[in-house]
Amino acid sequence: MGPEHLEEVLSLLVSAFQDRPFYRYIAPDETERREFLTLNFRLRLEHNLGTSEIDLAFRDQRILGVAVWTPPESVPPAEDHSLEEACAVFSPGLRERFFGFLHTLMAARDQVIRQPYWGLAPIAVLPEEQGKGIASALIRKKLQEIDASRAACFLGTQDAVNLDIYARYGFQKVREDPLAPGSIHYTMIRPEQG
């Protein structure tokens, strides 16, 4: 992915995550949720452009899917004050839920995996293109490269349906952390292969 793809990938991510139960929990108000997702993913993509490998799936020059892979030793720090400053425009409840989630994610990550490892987040496909193997192709392609380097992988998901999907690629659920009533964060790792 290059800077010329930023706006299209940003739009894809917002549309893919806008109605997910986890983000409804983070930002119950639909307008605030869209603004939050736009800001959050914009900051993440801009940071990842220089530090991560961002794979895109295309059809007829249209971006259908994206997978952001953070390489070993490039994991973002637990404390990112620029994100806190940027999120100051949102409601206190949203900020409390989101930063509580980030704390849970980082604590789980730090307890279950050590470097070197690759992180996968986010991965998304346009809603109307889901179920057509696009995410699978993005995952399989990168895992072949990762296996050659003999590194482990880490990801987190808040959608229980994803557990079986990621298990197909060798990811194992190693931790569950409650976020709110009915909302759980699942930590998954894929051990070094070969």
Image (spheres, grey):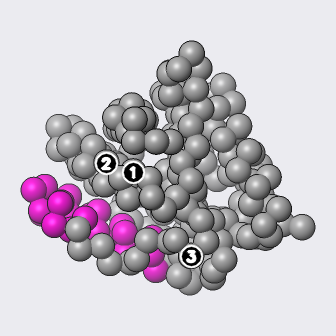
**Secondary element at tag 3:** loop
**Which label number is shown at residue 85?**
none
- The magenta stretch is 83-107
Q: Position of residue 118 (x, y in %)?
A: 63, 65
In front here: 166 or 9? 9
Question: Does residue 23 belong to the magenta stretch?
Answer: no
Kindly identify the amino acid type of the residue bearing the numbered disc 3.
Glu
Kindly identify the amino acid type of the residue bearing the numbered disc 1.
Leu
Circle 3 is placed at which residue position?
Answer: 73
**Secondary element at tag 1:** helix
**10 Å crowding of disc 2: few (<14), some (14-19), many (20+):** some
Question: Does residue 84 belong to the magenta stretch?
Answer: yes
Q: Position of residue 4 (x, y in %)?
A: 40, 35
Circle 2 is placed at which residue position?
Answer: 42
The relative height of residue 94 versus residue 55 in the rendered view (above or below) is below
Left/right placement of residue 48 relative to residue 194 reads left
Label 3 vs label 1: CA separation?
Answer: 18 Å
**10 Å crowding of disc 1: few (<14), some (14-19), many (20+):** many
Res. 96 visible in picture: no
Q: Which of disc 3 and disc 2 is earlier in sequence?
A: 2
Residue drawn at (13%, 55%) of the image:
90
Circle 1 is placed at which residue position?
Answer: 45
Q: Are marks 1 and 2 in contact (CB under 8 Å)?
A: yes
Q: Position of residue 89 (x, y in %)?
A: 10, 56
Q: Residue furthest right?
A: 194
**10 Å crowding of disc 3: few (<14), some (14-19), many (20+):** few
Residue drawn at (34%, 35%) of the image:
7
